[in-house]
């Protein structure tokens, strides 16, 4: 199964958190140019592998044993990776301007990504898309009945942040807080869950290949 939801998940979580951090700096200080260069470099670092791995998964999903999962992961991941890579380059070069004529077109792209995430969230709820971790997977495999609903909620939270982006203005404090907290919560979940997957997926492969029964 062509599935890179370890590194992809880590990068996606970091991109979302870095965007929340950049938005906070822009909102509080009207930061531009060099003030956001460090964030730009970080976005480039995580945007590059996210774009590449998501692209590989997106064009090969028919070859896998579970294509619907790869659609839900790969295609929004590819869009997120491209946005991170392009946005990171702009920030790293100090060319960002916080005025509406510069940022407004991008907010509509982010809003469209929110619609995609909302659609995926509804699909997860409706079709039990995520299911549960197999029993061979340590830690995650010991807890059943939580993964599908949790992922649907997290996708929904991320979607809310994206959908609020076209409504954001510096004087709309409510929109700022909605976006910031939606991205912090969803970004932290993707980051921490994907870090955990390094242990659980390695354990699952060990259990499968060597017929062991590690549970934790």
Image (spheres, rainbow, N blue to C red):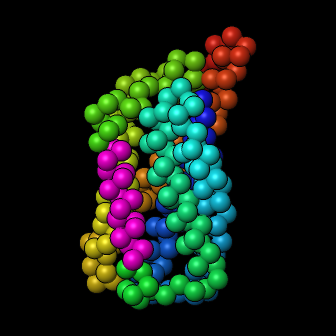
- Residue 53 in view here: yes
The residue nearer to you, when weighing 63 against 144, is 63
- Residue 180 in view here: no
Q: Which residue occupies the extreme right position in the image? A: 210
Q: Does the magenta stretch include residue 115?
A: yes
The residue nearer to you, when weighing 213 against 205, is 205
Location of the C terminus by quadrant is top right
Res. 127 image quadrant? top left
At x 64%, y 33%, the residue is 199
The answer to whether 163 is drawn above or below residue 3 in the figure is: below
Q: Give the range drawn in magenta.
A: 105-121
The answer to whether 176 is drawn above or below residue 153 in the figure is: below
| Left or right of 38 in this view: 146 | left
Task: Pinpoint residue 193: horizontal percent, then vertical percent.
Answer: 52, 42
Q: Does the magenta stretch include residue 5?
A: no
Task: Pinpoint residue 26: horizontal percent, then vertical percent.
Answer: 45, 81
Res. 61 image quadrant? top right
Task: Pinpoint residue 136: horizontal percent, then vertical percent.
Answer: 58, 18
């Amino acid at each position: 199964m062509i599935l890179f939801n370890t590194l992809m998940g880590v990068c996606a979580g970091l991109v979302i958190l870095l965007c929340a951090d950049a938005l906070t700096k822009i909102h509080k200080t009207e930061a531009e140019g060099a003030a956001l260069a460090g964030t730009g470099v970080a976005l480039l670092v995580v945007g590059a592998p996210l774009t590449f791995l998501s692209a590989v998964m997106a064009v090969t999903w028919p070859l896998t044993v579970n294509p619907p999962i790869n659609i839900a992961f790969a295609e929004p991941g590819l869009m997120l990776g491209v946005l991170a890579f392009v946005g990171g380059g702009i920030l790293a070069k100090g060319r960002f301007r916080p005025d509406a004529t510069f940022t407004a077109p991008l907010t509509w792209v982010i809003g469209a990504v929110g619609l995609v995430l909302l659609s995926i969230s509804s699909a997860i709820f409706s079709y039990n898309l995520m299911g549960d971790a197999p029993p061979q997977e340590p830690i995650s495999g010991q807890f059943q009945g939580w993964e599908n609903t949790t992922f649907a909620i997290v996708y929904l939270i991320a979607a809310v942040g994206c959908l609020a982006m076209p409504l954001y203005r510096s004087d709309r404090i409510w929109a700022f807080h909605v976006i910031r907290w939606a991205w912090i919560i969803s970004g932290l979940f993707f980051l921490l869950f994907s870090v955990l997957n390094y242990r659980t997926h390695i354990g699952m492969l060990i259990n499968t290949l060597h017929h062991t029964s590690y549970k934790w």
